[in-house]
Image: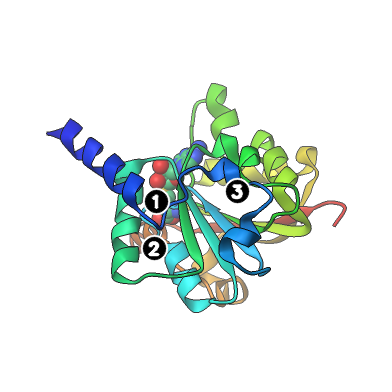
Amino acid sequence: MRLRNITGSKEMIAESDYVIHEPEKHKGRWHERFGNERPIRIEIGMGKGRFIMDLARSNPDINYVGIEKYSSVLLRGIQKMEEDPLPNLFFIRMEAEEITSVFDRDEVDRIYLNFSDPWPKDRHAKRRLPSREFLKRYDEILIPEGVIEFKTDNHDLFRFALEELEPAGWRLQQMTEDLHHDPEMMQGNVMTEYEERFSSMGNPIYKYIISRQRA
Ligand code: SAH
């Protein structure tokens, strides 16, 4: 039963026009794919896609790409797109470690990381999406003044993410340890699925916005 479900979602993804199937072929040519020169913003680990779909709907002048490694989750985003198609949004099913084979230097304007997997074991630190290893990859695709916005309710992951900044050549632009009670950073906040779940349980939400030290 389970296998059948997984096969079903892989097939549905393979047939979907909302998914970019060979993303490496678009490296350096994403603006052509969108048919305009507008900024490109990506969410890595988009889950079911609520956040990126809300952003794409309210910002038609910006292009978005949502990245997710699991078919079963991505499928939910595709189903929502079928009900409410958004011309400025595509999905990619991929592992984020491959990000530099998909986007070229200066091709991305902003990166969103929302409620990334914590990988609590020390030996898995490199897999954490705000780790220095990943910051190096983001450095290769973001425009010089590009920013990364990261939200989580995981205190340990947030502390780790802060410690990674300086050694990796990034600096804080803005930071809060309680987003939902920070009127300035809360302005225009777009909730994610996990954010709604964890904030309704009373968990504070941490957020940073970072840029390169030299920017
Ligand atoms: N951003 C969503 C989902 C958070 S859960 C929200 O805030 O509601 C984290 C998601 O990231 C999961 O769907 C997981 O499959 C995806 N993910 C984690 N590591 C990833 C990686 N290395 N590459 C691509 N997706 C990843």
Tag 1 near tag 2, CB within 8 Å? yes
Disc 1 residue lies near ligand 1 with CB under 8 A: yes
Residue at point 59% right, 76% down?
A: 61
Amino acid of disc 2: Arg
Indicate which disc, 3 or 1, sits on the residue closer to the N terminus. 3
In this rendering, the label closer to the viewer, 3 or 1: 3
- On screen, residue 87 versus residue 214, left or right, reads left
Residue at point 77% right, 48% down?
A: 170
Image coordinates of residue 87 in percent, x first then y, are: 47, 70
Which quadrant is home to the C terminus?
bottom right
Residue at point 52% right, 57% down?
A: 65
Label 2 SS: helix
Which numbered tag is attached to residue 26? 3
Disc 2 residue lies near ligand 1 with CB under 8 A: yes
Q: Circle 2 is placed at which residue position?
A: 50
Image coordinates of residue 24 in percent, x first then y, are: 58, 41
Q: Circle 1 is placed at which residue position?
A: 47
Q: Quadrant of residue 131?
A: top right
Depth check: 23 or 74 in front?
A: 23
- On screen, residue 44 versus residue 171, left or right, reads left
On screen, 90 above or below 188?
Answer: above
In three-dimensional space, the C-alpha distance between marks 1 and 2, rounded to whole angstroms, equals: 8 Å
Tag 2 near tag 3, CB within 8 Å? no
- On screen, residue 68 versus residue 139, left or right, reads left
Amino acid of disc 1: Gly
Amino acid of disc 3: His
Total number of numbered labels? Answer: 3
On screen, 41 above or below 186?
Answer: above
Label 3 SS: helix
Does any portion of residue 176 appear in the rendered image?
Answer: no
In three-dimensional space, the C-alpha distance between marks 2 and 3, rounded to whole angstroms, equals: 24 Å
Which quadrant is home to the N terminus?
top left
